Amino acid sequence: MSSHQVQLLFVDLGLILFLARGLGHLATRVNQPAVVGEIVAGVLLGPTLFNGAISELLFPDAVRPMLTAMADVGVALFMFAVGLELEGSTLRGRSRVTGGAILGSTVAPFMLGIGLAVYLMRTHEVTNTAAFVVFVGLSVSVTAFPVLARILTERGLSKTAVGGIALATAASVDVVAWSALAGIQATVGGGGEHWRAMLALPYLVAMMYLVRPALRALFVKDGKAVAFAPWHLALVFIGVMLSGAATEAMGMHFIFGAFLFGTVMPREKTLALRTEIHDRTAQVTTLLLPVYFVVAGLKVDLGSLRAADLAELGVILLVAVAGKFGGTYLGARSQGLPPRPSTALGVLMNTRGLTELVILGVGLQLGLLDTGLYSLMVVMAVVTTAMTGPLLSLVYRKPVEVPRAPGSSKPELMTSSST
């Protein structure tokens, strides 16, 4: 690595952090998640502007592999944090409404996504039809659990009934999505050695019955969580990297190993310790995830979109929004949730954020998406995430009583528009 390449790498990192933090801050000023501004920063540094002249000047081929490696570390730690945030009580949900919302939020967009895949195959070359169809259905079904959790917290909704249902639904949908994506990855990315995917079963058993008890023995003493120490963070990072390496060796993406390591972290009586680990991890991902946005943005070219591409984008947005909103709304209403909280739930489930970008990146890496379709899907992720805040403000403002399940002593409060 030459001195000039080192200089350029440092300049790139400084520019990436400056733009990501700046646009992320601007996004929060207009009631948008910071991730929206950070994704836009990545797209602006890509080939979209000035016919790619900026990206070629700032990010030559010699520097991109180093940025990609840093981005991969950031995504691995992000996926660990997603797994760390999942709670068993959240996945079980709060009532039968959660089951209806999960079913509607998964099945409806997936089925519409299959139709979308058939439509897209007319204009995009597809080498593996079955994998492409499943992947497109999956990509419009996902909800970004971390972004959703932050939206609910910022608006004071995380402790409300609709907030609990939203978290339980998003968590369950994401677990299904990651599992399905792991299956696609094992099928398409096996490189002819699909037998490696069979190692996933003993790997899961080892994580559940060896790694989880070992972590509990390290982090819980005499029924109490140990005090945080620097070596805890080092141990966690080592575990994330090794788990990611293991799933990569099985023909699956490293994100699955990182995510699973987060889920096997001990839960009982370790909230303060997990919060400390999560916060320390977030300090690292705050620096590395913007690099991922730029690496993703280098593959997004919106400057060459034609009228036909814009028509495709309209269809993709229609399917993505209608599938998630309509499916969630009908699923919640079928279990007795009133119309306005059901509407709010449908709006929340359209949050996609970085989770969608990670999935799309896997699809591009596997060759399931070409660069044109990848660009359109990235726009869909940004637009649907940006829609969430304004739409939620319209439909979810005023406290109203919502009947609890039979046997409850009093009704729960939900927030709903007065109009």
Image (cartoon, rainbow, N blue to C red):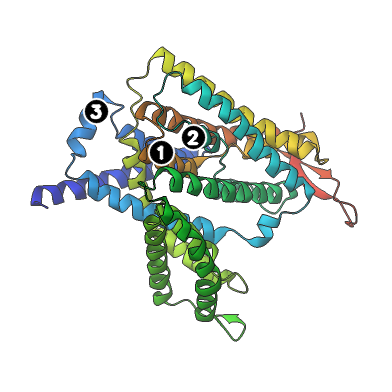
Q: Earlier in the sequence, mark 3 or mark 1?
A: 1
Residue at x 72% of width, y 34% of height? 329
* Residue 251 in view in this figure: yes
Residue at x 41% of width, y 34% of height? 368
Q: Position of residue 25 (x, y in %)?
A: 43, 43
Q: Secondary structure at mark 3?
A: helix
Q: Residue furthest top?
A: 307
Residue at x 43% of width, y 77% of height? 229
Q: Earlier in the sequence, mark 1 or mark 2?
A: 1
Q: Secondary structure at mark 2?
A: helix
* Residue 80 in view in this figure: no
Q: Which label number is shown at residue 52?
A: 3
Residue type pointed to by label 3 = Gly
Q: Is residue 244 above or below residue 215?
A: above
Q: Is residue 9 above or below residue 381?
A: below
Mark 1–mark 2 Cα distance, whole angstroms, equals 10 Å
Q: Secondary structure at mark 1?
A: helix
Q: Is residue 64 above or below residue 307?
A: below
Please give the residue where the numbered disc 2 appears in the rendered image.
381
